[in-house]
Image (spheres, helix red, strand yellow):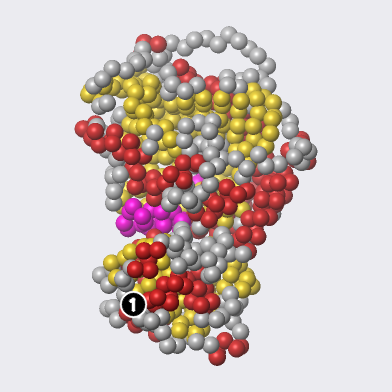
Amino acid sequence: MRITNKNISEIKIAWNLELLFSIADRFSGVCLFTSADDNNRGRNIVCINPVIKMDSPEKVDTVLKENSDMSSEFPLVAGYISYDYKDKLEEPGLYSDKHDHMFPEFRFAVYEYYIIAENSNKDSLKLITLEFDSSHIKADPDTFFSRTVETEHREPVTKYSDTSLDKLHFEQGVRSIKNYIKSGDIYQVNLTRKISGTTNIEPLDLALRLKDSNFIEFGVFANIDGKYIISTSPERFFQIREGILTSEPIKGTIRRSSDTKRDDLNLSNLMKSRKNMAELAMIVDLLRNDMNKVCSEVKVTGFPLSMKLKNVYHLYAGIEGKLNTDSFTDIISALFPGGSITGCPKIRACQIIEELEPEGRGPYTGNYGYICFNGDMDFNIMIRTLLYDKGKISFSVGGGITLLSNPEEEFEETIHKAKNIYDASCMEEIWEERYCLTGR
Amino acid sequence: MKILIFDNYDSFTHNLKALIRKAVKDADITIKRNRDLSALDEEFDVLVISPGPMTWKETGLLTDLFEKTVIPEKKPVLGICLGMQFIAGYFGYEITACKKPLHGSAVNVMHNSDPLFNNIPESFTAARYNSLGLEFAEDMEDGPLEMIAFEEGSGSVMAAKHVLFPIAGFQYHPESFLTEYGETLIKNFMEIYAHNK
């Protein structure tokens, strides 16, 4: 199937994220969004009604080639890769077949409609309409902007069901990793655990409750065949603009303070942390390596850098390279999965993750993003991500384990990272988590 | 010049490749993973052993490659991190837990003015990613390797070369962005051991 025509129209309408999410919700769509900062930079894209679906990187490349005449910023191919897809991009036999089957592992699509809403313009948006060379189920644009009024008001309740690793087992995992590091297997491993529950809150409401929980660099609200991915990721994996591939890995975050002196002290502590700095250096070398597979002139443009957001400072670095290929398959095979969520060396780290984490990760720590027909791309890292299927929810939290890690502190950190999702989903207090009485 | 990078399933192998390409103009570089049988039939002028996870004994076909080609044909070998540990282990030295394991941290390295360090200051900054290594011992001087660089402070061996074969290993990572004079080191190695100018 090919795209035969493209129309762009401007629509004068006061919009907000709630409207955009609701359109994605009603039309098997996805909304990719960025929190508006003080300068109102960033934009939001809603993709409506998937028409051409792709289940492998090779099929994405075929669709890109067949529609190369669309070579501009819009339309685009949007979708995601689950972490568990990693074994399809590596030498066979390196990984086990541990997979989470809640969501398809690879799903990209060309959509019938695209809405582009700039954070700097709250009174109008652009609607792009595509036509195709063969028939397909059509969405009705007249219904996009008419919101149905929610009438039902239930007390929101989310019940805790389980964690894939309780306190005891998570801390044992941290100790195992430290032993692996000591015996030379690995420099660092990212260990995560999955928390699951049941909820009476609708996915759209969950997304609306989560969208203000922190600064979201690259958020996602996606309806995948009636299941939902809600990502409030602060982290971009990589971006390609005019043949330049850039990545800005974050390692280390500290809360900001209203007291100026305290705020400055927090920042200087962040910049001085040995653990953070070593982790950041490692991920920079790892990303340089992965970028060197498909780029020339790979260089570190900043190390270390600090990013000042409303509530937090992030420690990060900048790397860029000149891309040598236009094949999505080559690019994703070189970079996937993102080194900041595996550890290093990557293959051995992934093997240790399979050994220590009882379940597949599913979309968590995979990447959501888009590919333009002109070769530009943008992908996040799906952390701070909630998955929803018929009243069941799950989300995962974890951290980078190094020789300097303390097992108790690392577990505590996972609770801290889960807090926004606990709060937004009204998950009941789960003191068992902390005291390890989950009956395992 | 044909360069074979023997890849121990590492995540820095392509940084090493990029560094060699920068340092050696006519480099024709092939990467083979350590379980790949075709590595044994590959023709090459220089062998580069990548860093990697685990121990020097867990490097797949590397011992076979040494016995089949490297030693009989006196091929030049450059070993990095695990690569240096393999060289030391292969020639009978004991690889032990480091006094100070470090991953992603820069240290000061001091060398003994061996020609491999031509145009490199006596003390320079280099990145370490290792828990295991070669610790200096008095009886080392009787062995076939000459220790040519050490970490300031701990005294751990940071570079060693064979006294007869054109084989040298570096414990630190010349390909890391934290390391100084990585390109100079590769140029020196190729010039001295592979007569490449």
Residue visible at 61% across and 73% down in the picture: B96
Chain bearing mark 1: B
- The answer to whether A102 is drawn above or below residue A299 in the figure is above
Instruction: List x then y, in percent, for residue B4.
Output: 35, 68
Q: Which class describes the residues within 10 Å of circle 1: few (<14), some (14-19), or many (20+)?
A: many
User: Which residue is located at x 54 percent, y 69 percent?
Assistant: B57
Residue A215, image x, y percentages: 53, 36
Q: Position of residue A168 (x, y in %)?
A: 74, 46
Helix, strand or loop at label 1? It is helix
**Image point 38% across, 81% down: which residue?**
B72
Q: Is residue B150 above or below residue A378?
A: below
Q: Identify the residue shown where x is 48% and y is 80%.
A: B160
Quadrant of the rendering where the N terminus of chain B is positioned: bottom left
| Residue span colored magenta | A284-308
Position in image of residue A51 (x %, y %):
34, 23
Above-or-below relation of A131 to A175: above
Q: Report which residue position mark 1 lands on.
A: B190
Q: Is residue A210 above or below residue A282?
A: above
Q: Is residue A328 in view from this perspective?
A: yes
Q: Is residue A127 left or right of residue A261?
A: left
Q: Quadrant of residue A374?
A: top left
Q: Is residue A392 left or right of residue A288?
A: right
Left or right: where A11 falls relative to A304 = left
Please state which amino acid type lies under the numbered disc 1: Met
- Towards the viewer: A430 or B168: B168
Single out the residue that lies furthest toward the bottom: B142
Quadrant placement of the C terminus of chain B: bottom left
The one nearer the camera, A207 or B168, is: B168
* Residue B102 in view in this figure: no
